[in-house]
Image: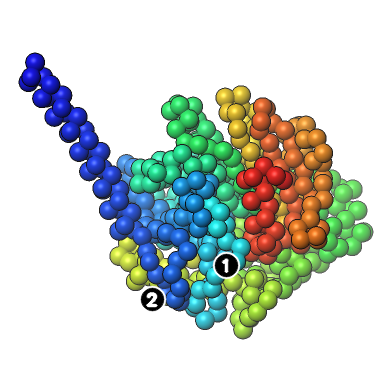
Amino acid sequence: MTTIKHNKSQKRRSVRNRYDDDHEHEQDVNERNRIYKLPGYSKAFRSKIYVSFMRLPHSDKYLHYWFIEAEHNPKDAPLFFWTNGGPGCSSLLGLFEEIGPFMPDKNNKLRDNEWAWTKFANIVFVEQPVGVGFSYSPHKKDYSSNDKMASKDNMAFLIEFFKIFPEFKTNKLYLTGESYAGHYIPMWAHELLLHNKRFNHEYNFRGCILINPLITPEAGDESQIETYWGHQRIPLSIWEKFKKHNCRNKSGLHSAYCRQLTYKIDDMVNKINPYAIDYPLCVNNPQQNQLHKYTRKQPHAETKTEPKNVSGGIYEKSCIDKYTDDYLNSKAVRQQVIKPHSNKNWYACTNYEYYRLKDANNSMVKYMREHLYDTDVHHFDILIISGTNDAICGTIGTQKWIKSLNLKIKDGHDWKQYFIEGQPKGYMSTYKGHGNKTISLVSVNNGGHEVPLYKPMVAHNVVQKFLNNSL
């Protein structure tokens, strides 16, 4: 009897010691990955920052990520997983140019971002798929990817993340991103919801936040021309021909006549930044590379504009990619943050020849509908922020795919104008899914493709209201 008691006590101590060892291991890993300073930034960080590479299970894929805790009450603040689009664009663009705590300038210094989302949220910026940014694999085959593979890898990353940071497992979790994240996020959400059903709602998954997302192919090509018309970049005569020959529909758009007409429209529109059509022209080469994947012909060489000798105001917003590129590829940053993990150069957008680009023609509406109609999910909200100055994923296309969900409008929330500091900033509509689930569309007047870059105060305000259920 005594022996049995002794063995049970010993077993309890063994389990406790194993738990303590694991906890200490997590703390060691976190402390090893935590950074306390960055080149070009002399101040103390306002919250904890971790930078590392996550090796995905049963593979040699290493996804690079930055985890930045919320400035206020991180244990209770929501947890965002953020990804940029492309496919092939780095999520460090979102960190250093949009929603992170600091932004680079032309002198390779970092300045504070007044409208950082890390003021109210914990954010994980993950560079995915493998091959994007600093993420890498020693095997060439791992650089081949598609939407389905990306969603599986993203889910594997999320699971591994919570093994290292289990204290954030109960925080409200949101998948967030922009542009081609309109493919990444709905499919990642699908994997996460399936996981929660299998494992008794292991994660506190509460919804998605998407900025100018590419949900359907029509939200790209077709709405681009319609946005040009709405912003008076093409004459009425051309727009009437475009409508008359059914070029607004997928079937008509690829006819010989419509192709020729779109070539003519491209030439007529000429030199503008399609990501922010009323802003100064500073479409850099990474953006051009991404744009060419979906345009019907290569633009004239002279439309490729390098961001040289630009500083201050809205010009700086247009050309900040160059500052981010210079900063992340600087010797000081690479030695302090990246080395010895990767010798890769960092690119804003990888020329992703290995990604199955035909996936861009797939509609994500079925996933959005699935999330909103799922009877096993009781609390799930989707926020779509759409900058009206973006032609790449125009607001008109976003309205169309949301309409196709056939949801009822929430009382009093049909295209309601909203104000910040007494000034009109756009319109919003909220639709009801099953139970308590909702999807809200918020347009942002004069917002470019990257709304938090062009309209940071508005994006910051809208997201906080969404989180507080006060839209």
Q: Label 2: which residue?
A: 331
Residue at (61, 81) in percent of width and height = 308
As displayed, is residue 419 above or below residue 246? below
Residue 286 image offset from top left, x and y in percent = 57, 66
Q: Secondary structure at mark 1?
A: loop
As displayed, is residue 150 above or below residue 374? below
Residue 353 image offset from top left, x and y in percent = 50, 56
Q: Label 1: which residue?
A: 113
Q: Is residue 468 left or right of residue 405?
A: left
Cα–Cα gap, marks 2 and 1 = 23 Å
Q: Is residue 124 left or right of residue 429?
A: left
- Tell me whether circle 2 and circle 1 mark residues in contact (CB < 8 Å): no
Disc 2 crowd rating (10 Å Cα; few below 14, some 14-19, many 20+) is: few
Which amino acid type is shown beneath numbered disc 2?
A: Lys
Residue closer to the observer: 432 or 330: 432
Residue at (60, 43) in percent of width and height = 208
